[in-house]
Amino acid sequence: MKRASFTIFKAVVHALVLREIQTRFGSQKLGYLWAIVDPMAQIIVFASIKALLFGGSMPGIDYPVFLATGFLAYDLFKHITLRSMDAFKANKGLFVYKQVKPFDTLVARTIIEVLITSVATTIFLCIGLYFGFDLEVKDLNMVILGFLWIALFGFSLGILFAVLATFYENFAKIIRLIFMPLMFVSALFYTVESLPPIARDFILLNPVIHFIELIHGSYFPELETTYVDFTYMTFWTLIPLYFGLWLYKRSEQKIVMS
Amino acid sequence: MIVLENVTKYFKVKNEKRYILKNTTLTIPEGVNLGILGRNGAGKSTLLRMLGGIDFPNSGRIYSDKKFSWPMGLAGGFQGSMTGRQNVKFVCRIFGKSQEEIQEAIAFVQEFSELGKYFDMPIKTYSSGMRSRLSFGLSLAFDFDYLLIDETLSVGDKHFKDKSKKALMKKIEKSNILLVSHAMPTLRELCDAGVVVHNGTMHYFDNIEDAIKEYNRINQ
């Protein structure tokens, strides 16, 4: 008896997620630690820079918490997009089983990143509680929406990039290059409000900044989501998703054979 | 039954199309064990991959309502950083086996592949012979209508070869095989019918002996 395609899809994604957990973190438990240490290091570095160079902090806001919320979301987005881009190549050997579609590897990697972020968030919350940071959330639902949406945004770009990277060798390199300065123009250590008006118009062209502002503005009672443009975010999510899926559908067989 | 309908398959080599099949229409009848013969590079492995659903014709179509295994070759679809056991689990999961069935499969493959402590070591530490033993053992743990085998039988020591052949003989009481091989004795022993892939065409012979004769003819 043949199984329905959705049943197969679920079984494959489940198997891929388990497999990815085993291989990503490997036999050394260091891998798990890294998922926490990486964002933690970023927070410590930038919190120190801010304290040493600029002094003071945002009134009413614990700056490390501000950094943590932004970096967790930003890293989630970055990891989904970049790891999706490599997913086909990394899982090539598994396409020998016709049940395993390249698309499934993207879904599995996205699920993994969401899981890692959930675990990291939980640990951060515990650390925050221990050190007595102010963890009060203004609008928890909007914060969760922000995280889920940025994950979907990452997936949209991820599928498009993954297909393009299969056919253009240098594509992945260019994307990686773009990601390097992206961190500095995504309102991770400042708010859009704090920028001069002329800089705001430019920086708001970056779609990522809208997600970070949404999360910051919904998290902290002292901040607003004035600059968040939901239409712009929707376009940036749906257009790459549409083209990504369309290109994928056209080239699925080629990806399996390549 | 497997039907090939106007199947064309080529590879582009330096902008030149090298045909494996050119507008081939062919029906492979129900219940035969088929040997696939052809010279090196004729496209036997590609044909096997197409039957396994992981390679695709440039035009035309191949269809069948049977369940095919993955092509068992020397490379094998394994993740190098995972252990033999983990890979077996992975394949069981994608085929939707229950927890209980997975345990059974693991026990079977572990016993059959004779990997010893290597069963719990990363696949990248395996020799190619060990890989194909795992791959072969794994495929026996499933019930397919057709087993796709690419030269796997030619690896391993004599003891393992005999054991594989015996296991295969037992398996083909219920399933069929599509076997790519250059070893005529193996083909004679396991296959009823044969196809010869040559110069973009594919000839089907009801009797494996005729296929072998044709193969010998084109080799002269």
Image (cartoon, coloured by chain):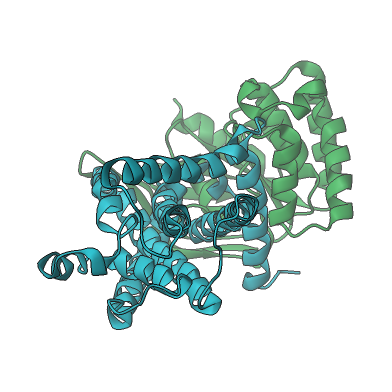
Q: Colour of chain B?
A: green
Residue A249 is situated, as x and y percent measured from the top left of the image, at 40, 67
Please determine whether, in this image, residue B55 is positioned above or below residue A192: above
- Which chain: cyan? A
Residue lying at 33% horizontally and 52% vertically, measured from the top left = A56
Residue extending farthest bottom? A231
Of the pair A4 and B103, the residue shown nearer to us: B103
The answer to which quarter of the image holds residue B154 is top right
The answer to which quarter of the image holds residue B129 is top right
Residue B71 is situated, as x and y percent measured from the top left of the image, at 61, 44
Please determine whether, in this image, residue B9 is positioned above or below residue A135: above
Of the pair A123 and B26, the residue shown nearer to us: A123
Residue A90 is situated, as x and y percent measured from the top left of the image, at 48, 42
Of the pair A63 and B197, the residue shown nearer to us: A63
Question: Could you tell me which quadrant the C terminus of chain B lies in?
Answer: top left
Q: Give left or right: position of A32 versus A77.
A: right
Q: Give left or right: position of B109 versus A139.
A: right
Q: Give left or right: position of A87 versus A8.
A: left
Residue A235 is situated, as x and y percent measured from the top left of the image, at 29, 78
Question: Could you tell me which quadrant the N terminus of chain B lies in?
Answer: bottom right
Please determine whether, in this image, residue B23 is positioned above or below residue A149: above
